[in-house]
Amino acid sequence: MTVIKLTTQAYCKMLLHAAKYPHCAVNGLLVAENQKRKDGQPVLCVDCVPLFHGTLALAPMMEIALTLIDTWCKENKYVIAGYYQANERIKETRPNQFAEKVAARIAENFSEAALIMVDNSNISMGCYDPAISVFEHHDNKWKCRDASIDCCEDWSEAQKIMSALLEDRSYDSLIDFDNHLDDLRNDWTNPEINKSILHLC
Amino acid sequence: MASVSDMYDVTWEEMRDKLRKWREENYRNSEQIVEVGEELIQEHASKLGDDIWIIYEQVMIAALDCSRDDLATTCLHELQKQFQGSHRVKRLAGMRLEALERYDEALKMYNDILQDDSTNTAARKRKIAILKAQGKSTEAIRELNEYLEQFVGDQEAWHELAELYINEHDYAKAAFSLEELMMTNPHNHLYCEQYAEVKYTQGGIENLELSRKYFAQALKLNNRNMRALFGLYLSASHIAASPKVSAKVKKDNVKYAAWAASQINRAYQLAGHGTKETKCSLKAVEEMLESMQIMPS
């Protein structure tokens, strides 16, 4: 079974999104490089596009975001490879119907798509544990993958950098698609944050 | 740790005014409120006059959001000293218990208030908030509906109900709640736009046509609402592409979609002056609109 892994950039931006809106549900997409993979090679999600915060379960803006980001992916030789969601309630870690629908739609285009749920209770300044659960599509159901499999390409690097970003309150400058719709000049590719992460590596 | 006034070169009056702006516009930027408010209270309390009480309340609620129980308790004590026996302050004490997840004790506080004053809306709404926090969405919805039967004019409650229904994927009831809001706030473009999104999500030609109309209405009320513009484009495109509509309806919707597309392009061009990143965005939008174009039948 193909394993999904996240680069430090993808993991950090996803958690920064959750940290920016602690009182809201948030969601977004994960993208991977569009290339042929050898058998057994994991799918590496290299970047994350934060989408919405607040009321997630409405279709139109999600459709626009998926189409726009799909076009952007093609320009950059990426493919949409996953969907993440952080629920509003700290103890709620299961995906809802909307999450499953979006993930299924992504899977139509990329069969090994992953559905990632952020585990809100594991987000801390020290970043002791990976704060996500990965769900994979088996027999038309989304099943949670064994937590012992490492989800990050380099967990200790991700941990170190995530901690530094949280200390710096970098989440204040994270732009999601909602922010972009509020003001088109807001850039959802987050080049400044990408630079900060690279700088910390 | 540098003080806020040093870091941002602001006076205490500017800090006080910022807090007021955030209070009046109902922002939930709790970290900032705590940062600014705590300094204001600690360094400039004597200059604030009677404003200090409402600032204590605002900072206390923000402190709860940030798990700063120390700060929240300080503010609460000051308020309890000044306004002994006040229901408004008792509600704040209840909120602190909620933040500590001591829901049973919080419930008791609110029930005490309601026994004293059965029309106290704040206490009733906190009880519903507890149900929401505990994940009891069905009960929260039921209680909120009962509340709204009595307090029909409570906008905040109608909006909360709409959001609860959306989260439960009950789009029909969400639409109904938003209709109430639109009736009492006909000039609010945000309600129009959200209603249109709900209708679109419900699906089916009739709902799509309604959604297009309400996206258009939202645009009339605020021609810079990008969501309404995108929504108009999407809904018109889908109607035009549907095999179930007449040739005239198809033709009309192709026109609406084309107009919306040109407006979207224009908006991106206006926003994109100069930076490389926004040029990428513009290109992506152009390609997206092309890829979604309806072939004339």
Image: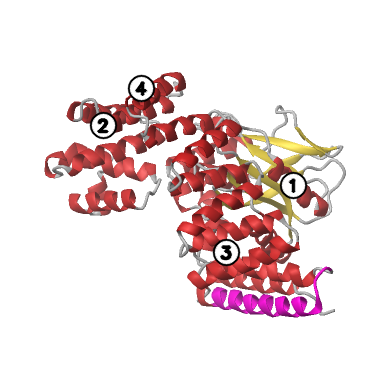
Mark 2 — on which chain does it sit? B
Residue type at numbered disc 4: Asp
Of the 4 image quadrants, the one containing the C terminus of chain B is bottom right
x 52%, y 30%: residue: B131
Query: Badge 4: how crowded within 10 Å, few (<14), some, or many (20+)?
Result: some
Give the overall secondary structure of the magenta segment: helix
Image location of residue B134, percent across then percent down:
54, 28
Q: Are marks 2 and 1 on the same chain?
A: no
Viewer-proximal residue, A154 or A65?
Answer: A65
Q: Which residues are magenta?
A: B244-269
Residue B245 in magenta? yes
Residue under label 4: B112
Name the mark on residue B227.
Answer: 3
Give the alpha-carbon distance from disc 2 to disc 1, as whole Å: 45 Å
B58 left or right of A74 in image: left
Given contact means CB atoms under 8 Å apart, are the residues at marks 1 and 4 in contact?
no
Given contact means CB atoms under 8 Å apart, are the residues at marks 2 and 1 in contact?
no
Residue under label 2: B75
Q: Are marks 3 and 1 on the same chain?
A: no
A124 left or right of A61 in image: left
Image location of residue A192, percent across then percent down:
50, 57
x 75%, y 59%: residue: B204
In front: label 1 or label 4: 4
Q: Which of pointers 4 and 3 lies earlier in the amino acid sequence?
A: 4
Q: Which of pointers 2 and 3 lies earlier in the amino acid sequence?
A: 2
Give the alpha-carbon distance from disc 4 to disc 3, as whole Å: 44 Å
Give the alpha-carbon distance from disc 1 to disc 4, as whole Å: 44 Å
